[in-house]
Image: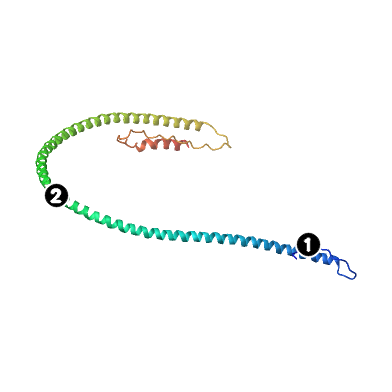
Amino acid sequence: MKLSPLDIRHREFPGKFGGYDRLSVRQFLTDVAEELEGVLQERQAMQERTHELERRIEEMQQQEDEIRRTLVAAERMGHDLRETAARESEVILAQANVFRDAIHNDAQARSTELEAAHQSRISALELAFRGRFADLEREQHQLILERERAQAERMADLERVFSDRHSDLSARLASVRQEYAQFLSGYRALVSSFGELSARHILPEESAPLERPLLPTIPPPILEPGLPEMPAARPEAHEAPRIEEQQFL
């Protein structure tokens, strides 16, 4: 008789005087039912796992049979291909021998024809080369004469442009030097007048010291590319403002 966990849980026994404790018996039956239920669940899981493994084994056997059939078919196909390739190679080799002989004979005949045409062509090329060489010598001499004449004209143009450009730059340089001298003279006068005013002015005792004025930076004149550089300014032109500044401080 098969017993389920539910049958064990609800099993009833007839009462008897001096018998077992009903609560202990009921607790034991409950424990047995739970243990049996766990065993049955584990058995069910093992059966499902067994069925899954049997199914996978069957699939692997089918795949193995399929691979075995494929290998047999591949071996048979390879054997057929080797036999077919051997037969085709023999036919191709025979055709190649025939074709080789035909090409060799044709090549010999063609070589004879080409040798005759080559000699004729060499003679014609020698005559054409001599005529062309003479023409090239005349053309080279003419080109040399024209190049020398063009070079002389170009040198004359360059000298004229250089002379004009040099005169223009010299005039611009003189103008820039004059403007710089005027600016330097005005700057010296301004510094001198400012020194006199500061000497007349009485500063408070707690007044903060005057900050040292920053001298303006005179950027050099910008020349166009390819032009000669301007000569550096004389040292005395730059040292004069520094002397005035020291006297002012």
* Residue at image mark 1: 7
Above-or-below relation of 105 to 39: above
Q: Nearer the viewer, residue 1 or 150?
A: 1
Q: Residues within 10 Å of mark 2 (few under 14, many from 20)?
A: few
Q: Nearer the viewer, residue 221 or 203?
A: 221
Q: Residue furthest right?
A: 17
Q: Earlier in the sequence, mark 2 or mark 1?
A: 1
Q: Secondary structure at mark 2?
A: helix
Above-or-below relation of 126 to 6: above
Above-or-below relation of 189 to 73: above
> What sort of colour scheme is used for the picture?
rainbow
**Quarter of the rendering containing residue 135:** top left
Mark in the foreground, 2 or 1 = 1
Left/right placement of residue 171 relative to residue 76 reads: left
Left/right placement of residue 180 relative to residue 55 reads: left
Q: Nearer the viewer, residue 90 or 228?
A: 90
Q: Residue at x 34, y 59 (%)?
A: 83
Q: Residues within 10 Å of mark 1 (few under 14, many from 20)?
A: few
Residue 109 - label:
2
Residue type at mark 1 is Asp
Q: Secondary structure at mark 1?
A: helix
Q: Position of residue 50 (x, y in %)?
A: 62, 62
Above-or-below relation of 9 to 229: below
Left/right placement of residue 18 relative to residue 179 reads: right
